[in-house]
Image: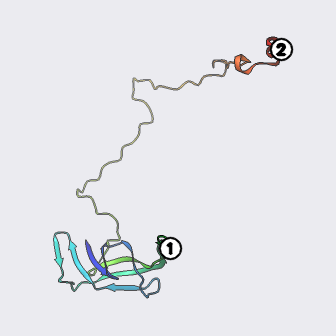
Amino acid sequence: MYAVIESGGKQYKVAIGDRLKVESLDLVPGASVDLESVLFLRDGDDVKVGSPFLGSTVTATVVGHGRGEKIRIFKMRRRKNSRQRTGHRQNFTELEIVSIDGKTADLTGKAAPASDSTPEPVEAADTAPEGQIEDTAVEASPADAAPEQEVTGGETGGDAEDSEKTS
């Protein structure tokens, strides 16, 4: 179920549980507000279109107030050495949609499965079936490991003795 509402000269598509930022409303956080400018309402296959508005209401709770991102404005008049930089941050009110046309969200969670039978949990076998031998990992002892090779001098590294022989 969703609706299209109008607030602050803008239109918003909302569903129950949605949070949206609208133009600043003069309300305290936690207050409830009824938005009566409902333009469109859809509930499954049932569609209602207003001309311009429906008689339905959307109820929302004020979550808080804030300010949007800064918009930077730069004006310049060429060849006049005239430059002007300003910025703007628009105030907004964040709303959470609680109900649409008197219908609230189902707080019990997700819908129940269609069939009455529930899938049985699969139990993991702790032992191998009879007649089969389990594969077990054998840890290698440090003596079995390959010895590490020590890097000595070489052409690029060189020792002091090697440099004396070449000079």
Residue 24 visible in the picture: yes
The residue sitting at 59% across, 25% down in the picture is 139
* Left or right of residue 106, residue 48 in this image: left
Q: Which of 64 and 106 is in front in this view?
A: 64
Disc 2 marks which residue? 164
| In the image, residue 162 above or below residue 126 | above
Residue occupying the far top of the picture:
165
* Left or right of residue 16, residue 70 in this image: right
Q: Position of residue 131 (x, y in %)?
A: 39, 23
Q: Nearer the viewer, residue 113 or 154?
A: 154
Q: Position of residue 152 (x, y in %)?
A: 73, 18
Whichever of labels 1 and 2 marks the residue nearer the N terminus, that label is 1
Residue type, label 2: Glu
Choose top left, top right, bottom left or bottom right for residue 10. Answer: bottom left
Q: Where is residue 113 in the image (x, y as percent from the top left)?
A: 26, 58
Look at the numbered disc 2 and give the secondary structure of its residue. helix
Residue occupying the far front of the picture:
79
Question: Looking at the rendering, in which quadrant would you find the C terminus?
Answer: top right
Tell me, yes or no, whether the two marked residues, 1 and 2, touch with CB atoms within 8 Å. no
Q: Label 2 neighbourhood size at 10 Å, few (<14), some (14-19), many (20+)? A: few
Disc 1 marks which residue? 80
Choose top left, top right, bottom left or bottom right for residue 161. Answer: top right
